[in-house]
Amino acid sequence: MKNLALVSLAALLAAPAAWADTIAANGPNGAHYANGSAEPVCTIDSSQDVSCTGTTIGGVGNTNATAILSATYSGTVQCRNHGGQIGDVKTQTTEATSSGTLRPSRNGQLVVPPLSTTAPTAQELQAAAVCPNGNWTKVLLGGPTLTSFVYTVTFAGFTQPYISVVGP
């Protein structure tokens, strides 16, 4: 476990925009990364979009899995009335999620495809804000900002993920 922590720390230091996963023993007996496959890595681009690489897990038999990438974004919205007064600042978050059910091939390999989310637009953040009434104008002060993301691969019949990547 100590070596895994050092490898994860080294990966973070070498590539600050990428996060390596942590694997728990929450999968079918014999599950492992297939030859030529690597652990998934998630990156954040300049638009705050999150992308996670795919992988192949061998030794899963007939066990299905679910892959989920969920990202939370925030932005600060102010509400202004026609007299120019500013109402309370409202912070809104929106969640973008990408997921899929994965079924292993006949040879017991599970292909986990790449997953990605797209940051909300300024208009989407403004639309999510709630002002005191419909006559107030919404003004976005900042955002969208990626607050957090979670990428998991969880096997059917298991309560905890086999792969979990959390950032930033």
Image (cartoon, rainbow, N blue to C red):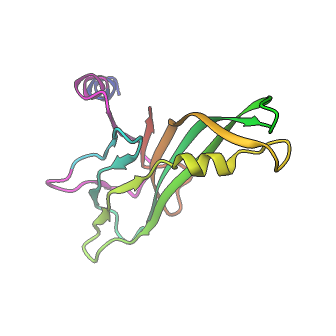
Q: Quadrant of residue 103?
A: bottom left
Does residue 80 show up magenta in the picture?
A: no
User: Magenta part of the protein: which range?
Assistant: 9-37
**x%, y% of residue 111?**
30, 64
> Taking 60 as reference, is 137 above or below it?
above
Quick check: can you spot residue 24?
no
Q: Quadrant of residue 28?
A: bottom left
Does residue 34 show up magenta in the picture?
A: yes
Residue drawn at the location 28% of the way across and 25% of the way down: 3
* Residue sitting at the far left: 36
* Residue sitting at the far bottom: 106
Residue drawn at the location 27% of the way across and 66% of the way down: 109
> Taking 31 as reference, is 93 above or below it?
above
Taking the image as shown, residue 160 lies to the left or right of residue 113, namely right
Q: Nearer the viewer, residue 130 or 27?
A: 130
Residue drawn at the location 34% of the way across and 68% of the way down: 61
**x%, y% of residue 26?**
45, 49
**x%, y% of residue 48?**
42, 40
Residue drawn at the location 53% of the way across and 36% of the way down: 143
Taking the image as shown, residue 140 lies to the left or right of residue 150, namely right
Q: Nearer the viewer, residue 157 or 102?
A: 102
Quadrant of the snapshot with the C terminus? top left
Quadrant of the snapshot with the N terminus? top left
Q: How many marks?
A: 0
* Residue sitting at the far front: 83
Quick check: can you spot residue 143?
yes
Q: Nearer the viewer, residue 62 or 73?
A: 73
**x%, y% of residue 121?**
51, 49
Q: Quadrant of residue 19?
A: top left
> Taking 167 as reference, is 114 above or below it?
below
